[in-house]
Image (spheres, rainbow, N blue to C red):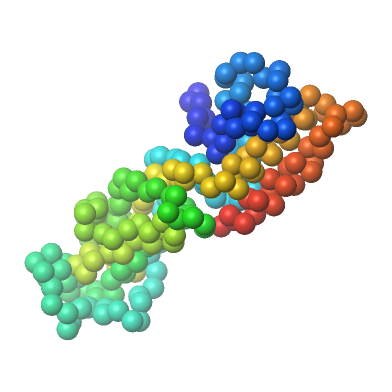
Amino acid sequence: MTADTPTPLATFAQLQEGAFADLVRSYASSQVQQDLMIEATRLCERAAGRRLAPFTNLTETERSTGIDPDEYIDAGNVPLDLAGTLGRSYSYAMGTTSLVRHGWLQQFAPHYPEYWSYNLQSITIHRSYGGDQVVNLANVRGPDPDTGHIWYPIGTFLPIGSFVTYVYGGGYATVPADLVRACKYMAASIAVRELDPTMAGHGHDPDILAADAHAICADYQG
């Protein structure tokens, strides 16, 4: 079984820098330390309902819908390059001029987009007619870190109702300070429950720590 090994939102060294150092002094193994921070990271992502830590090879499929009324549908009055002309001719031949120009990735930065990094690996269009097409990534604009928006140029044969499969990576290359704090709170909550499951005599309340972590992550919800 493949191990879950994301880059944690906070490191064990960061957890040890403050008041939680004594709490986790018994975590001597580097593997146990790493596992604690990975679990805390995944719990933060579940609380936020989105990916936060850097990730790769995420596959998403969306059904293309809608035509922007502010954009030309068939580009009848727009000068086109060779690719755009061929694409429009192909759409006429297939019996459609209603081509979708926009797509959106589900994972993007709700805050601090300047810290977010995308790696778009592939886009594949699955049409109910006309077959499948692997999109030339050099011809699309985006994705935009603050919205996940992808803009297809005129000539991309993407009829309404087609399915589009995206494979990409992303996440916070630089983790915002509040998410570091959330991860530390979540890790401390896990540690308290392991050390004192009945919460009979320990100085930290895991419920309060977890609630503080959830409160931070809630602002990152999708």
Looking at the image, can residue 62 be seen?
Answer: no
* x and y, in percent, of residue 98 in the image: 29, 75
Residue drawn at 17 percent across, 71 percent down: 88
Q: Is residue 126 left or right of residue 78?
A: right
Q: Nearer the viewer, residue 219 or 178?
A: 178
Q: Is residue 180 above or below residue 24?
A: below
Residue farthest to the bottom?
Answer: 77
Q: Is residue 111 left or right of residue 159?
A: right
Q: At 15% across and 68% down in the image, what residue appears?
A: 84
> Furthest-front residue in view?
18
For the C terminus, the quadrant is bottom right
Q: Residue at x 34, y 66 (%)?
A: 102
Can you name the residue that lies furthest to the right here?
A: 200
Closer-to-camera residue (183/168)? 183
109 vs 194, left or right, is left
Q: Quadrant of residue 159?
A: bottom left
Numbered disc total: 0
Residue 149 lies, in percent from the top left, at 38, 62
Q: Residue furthest top?
A: 29
Regarding residue 177, the answer to whether it shows in the image is: yes
Left/right placement of residue 86 relative to residue 68 reads: left
Residue 212 in the image: state x and y as whole percent.
72, 47
Q: Quadrant of residue 203?
A: top right
Residue drawn at x 28%, y 61% as measured from the top left: 141
Q: Is residue 130 above or below residue 17?
A: below
Judge whether 190 appears above or below 123 on screen: above
Image position, residue 210 (x, y; %): 73, 42
